[in-house]
Image (cartoon, rainbow, N blue to C red):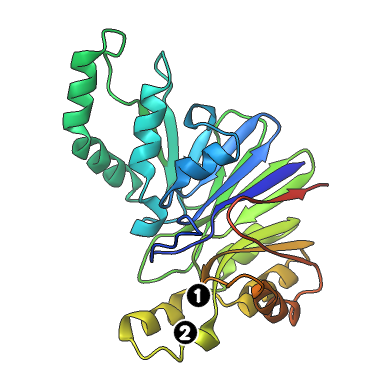
Amino acid sequence: MLAVTLLGTGGPIPDPQRAGPSTLVSGGSEQYLVDAGRGVLMRLAAAGVGPAQLNAVLLTHLHSDHITDLNDVITTRWITTFEPSPLTIVGPAGTRRVVAGIGESLGPDIGYRIAHHDDLDYPPPVEVIEATEGEIYLGGDVRISCAPTDHRPVEPTVAFRFDYGGASVVAAGDTVPCDGLDRLCEGAQALVHTVIRKEVVSAIPIPRVLDTLDYHSSPAEAAQTAARAGMDTLVLTHYFPPPAAGDEDAYRALAAEHFDGTIEVGDDLHRVEVRP
């Protein structure tokens, strides 16, 4: 069984009810964090998981709202473990440069803590893997693979697939429908997909908002991706605009026109179990 916990279902605009985009995928004793948006460690704590328990952080792309709190994950894991425990960070090309920049920005803090704590004499240990397609070998029982997605002009971008005990989940990130995502979804049971309400967004006369239309999927497009792969469950997240209380059915109805499986629309900490 794999469990999916929507840690953050919000977007770039701060929302008091929704953290930034991040999803926890759990299989057995293994914990994988997909993206690290605003407030991710608070949501992880609410889900009963600390940064020291993470097997890896997987980044779908390097847009700021998806990596805002990666520095917090790196730092908090470092100061709450008592022997070197490298944090594995997987992401598309460019991830190594971003992580190096985060390390540089944390330089003063790292120096302060090493000077103050006798038992902390090393900087935050991280291991970066840049991947675009294929299996990613992390040494656990959960099998992880990735494929390219289409969020241009943001590129490269990737989706991740998790297979464990006969269950399989794909976490798509931001993308329009594309061949890479279709390939990754083949034979999987559940798709976690970010979505925007295009019919709402298109009525907002702000160029910077309208620009989001051509590189995100609508609920209908996400549903069509899940339907093409014959999946059982579609989990929507990273909503724009975020559904008001009681308005979740609007997202669900748009997806249900194209997908007859289970459609999950939830707030932060919504949990979905995916079984073989």
Callout 2 amino acid: Val
Q: Quadrant of the N terminus?
A: top right
Question: Residue at the location (66% across, 79% down)?
Answer: 250
Which numbered disc, 2 or 1, marks the residue closer to the eye?
1
Image coordinates for residue 178, horizontal then vertical, percent = 56, 71
| Res. 58 in view | no
* Labelled disc at residue 241: 1
Left or right: where 265 falls relative to 238: right
* Labelled disc at residue 10: none
Left or right: where 148 falls relative to 62: right
Image coordinates for residue 248, horizontal then vertical, percent = 66, 72
Image coordinates for residue 200, horizontal then vertical, percent = 51, 86
Left or right: where 253 falls relative to 208: right
Q: Secondary structure at mark 1?
A: loop
Question: Residue at the location (50% across, 68% down)?
Answer: 175
| Res. 27 in view | yes
Q: Which residue is mark 2?
A: 201
Q: Secondary structure at mark 2?
A: helix
Image coordinates for residue 97, horizontal then vertical, percent = 27, 45
Q: How many numbered discs sit on the rendered protein?
A: 2
Callout 1 amino acid: Pro
Q: Estimate how packed mark 2 is, as few (under 14), some (14 to 19) or many (20 or more) residues with alpha carbons within 10 Å.
A: some
Q: Spatial distance from mark 2 to mark 1, Cα to Cα?
A: 8 Å
Q: Is residue 70 above or below residue 119?
A: below
Q: Is residue 234 above or below residue 43?
A: below
